[in-house]
Image (spheres, rainbow, N blue to C red):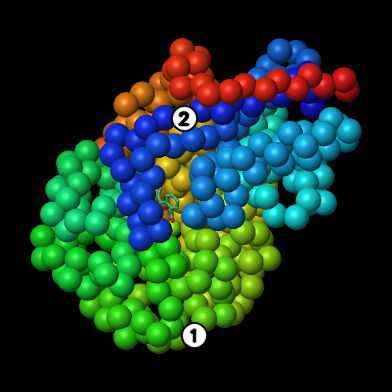
Amino acid sequence: MKIDSIELFVIQMPLKSPFLTHLGAVKVREGIIVKITNKDGLSGFGEGVAFSTPWYTEETVATCLHMLTDILIPLLEKHPIKHPEDASHLFSSVRRNNMAKAALETALWDLYSKSHSETLSKMIGGTRTVIASGVVVATDSTAKALQQIEQYLMEGYQRIKVKINPNQDYSFLTEIRRHYPDLPIMADANSAYTLKNIDRLKALDDFNLLMIEQPLGHDDIIEHALLQKEIQTPICLDESIVSFDDARKAVEFGSCKIINIKVGRVGGLYEAKRIHDYCFEKGIPVWCGGMIEFGISRAHNIALASLPGFTIPGDISESSRFWEEDIISPEVTLENGVIDVPLNPGIGYEINEKRLQKILLTKRTYTFTQ
Ligand code: OSB
Ligand code: MG
């Protein structure tokens, strides 16, 4: 993979409406777009999905820019690679900083697929032509949640996820279930509980939820195993799984029955695929998590979710769920509750350069001497 240049675009776009969790509100999304161009003039794209502040994981846009600029890009320049998997191995000499690594690694996968005239989905072993789509309701009002659920069901989403915490759980879910007794619903707590709340968590078994996502500590797998023994609802881990080994240990311990895979959180497509392959073999269902992302990460997610073990609809919504106008063309859209896996090489979407320019904050370019 002879690299000519790497460009980093720092962008910022307001969300259509604030995304609320017990950890705070996301109103404006900052992000990093990575463009890697090879000596033949082909370009691959990746997206750094860290937020402006470290509320979800420890990384931020600023830490990712530092890691990319001062560590990862120089490493890639010094050690030319033949395949995107080589980048994963190369980056393993750097601890954590998974979202920074994934931003580069995913761009390499897009470029590699394009240079082999193959879709990214096929390149990583995808088998689906369409993927099932779910959506997240993230608000602090029951009335708004009901309103949003109704709208999303009309748009065709197959599964709804709601955000919960000790101040918004039992009565909130009672009201939703009263309106939608049979709807596939899951609840994401983003670590809002401790084992002291075990009675509240046991009570949620009343709602026949598909799963409860990350109820306890963001880096815990021990207490989740204790909790899973006490509740019927399957536990799904999100924040706790940042590597293949985390996934393996969580499954071996019985800390969860389902895993949410996010490419950024685990450091790239290669690690995401390894976790998928392991879970597939063990009969652990997986689904693709979301990061309120722009179109490029959304496109990588679609390719990932086309792997056979992604049997639960993921947090992969339409571009219009969050954005007035996305940075890819065409935008991601839903038809009859599913999203088509694109047929063009690589991620299969073009970059909407005009939109990218409009939301651009800063740009840096690195020219390689390989
Ligand atoms: O916990 O899954 C999460 C968004 C940002 C950070 C963490 C999470 C989320 C979501 C869904 O819940 C986001 C989406 O639909 O893109
Ligand atoms: Mg989550």
Disc 2 to disc 1, C-alpha distance? 41 Å
On the question of residue 255 being in view, the answer is yes
For the residue pair 30 and 336, the one nearer the viewer reads as 30
Q: Secondary structure at mark 2?
A: strand
Judge left or right: residue 354 versus residue 45.
left
- Locate residue 122, reporting x and y percent: 59, 36
Specify the label residue 321 is tagged with. Answer: none
Question: Which one is earlier in the sequence, the residue at label 2 or at label 1?
Answer: 2
Q: Residue at x 50, y 16 (%)?
A: 357
- Give residue 215's quadrant in the image: bottom left
Q: Residue at x 36, y 49 (%)?
A: 25
* Quarter of the image where the C terminus is located: top right
**Residue marked by disc 2:** 12
**Relative to 92, does residue 118 appear above or below in the rendering?**
above
* Quarter of the image where the N terminus is located: top right
Q: Residue at x 43, y 78 (%)?
A: 194
What is the number of callouts on the image? 2
**Relative to 34, does residue 351 appear above or below in the rendering?**
above
- Give residue 118's quadrant in the image: top right
Q: Residue at x 64, y 26 (%)?
A: 8
**Relative to 357, does residue 199 appear above or below in the rendering?**
below
For the residue pair 195 and 22, the one nearer the viewer reads as 22
- Crowding around mark 1 (Cα neighbors within 10 Å: few <14, some 14 to 19, many 20+) is some
For the residue pair 273 and 141, the one nearer the viewer reads as 141
**Relative to 16, does residue 151 appear above or below in the rendering?**
below
Q: Name the kind of residue labelled 1 in the image.
A: Leu
Q: Secondary structure at mark 1?
A: helix
Q: Name the kind of residue labelled 2 in the image.
A: Gln
- Locate residue 54, reporting x and y percent: 54, 52
- Locate residue 258, reporting x and y percent: 47, 66
Specify the label residue 226 is tagged with. Answer: 1
Judge left or right: residue 331 versus residue 342.
left
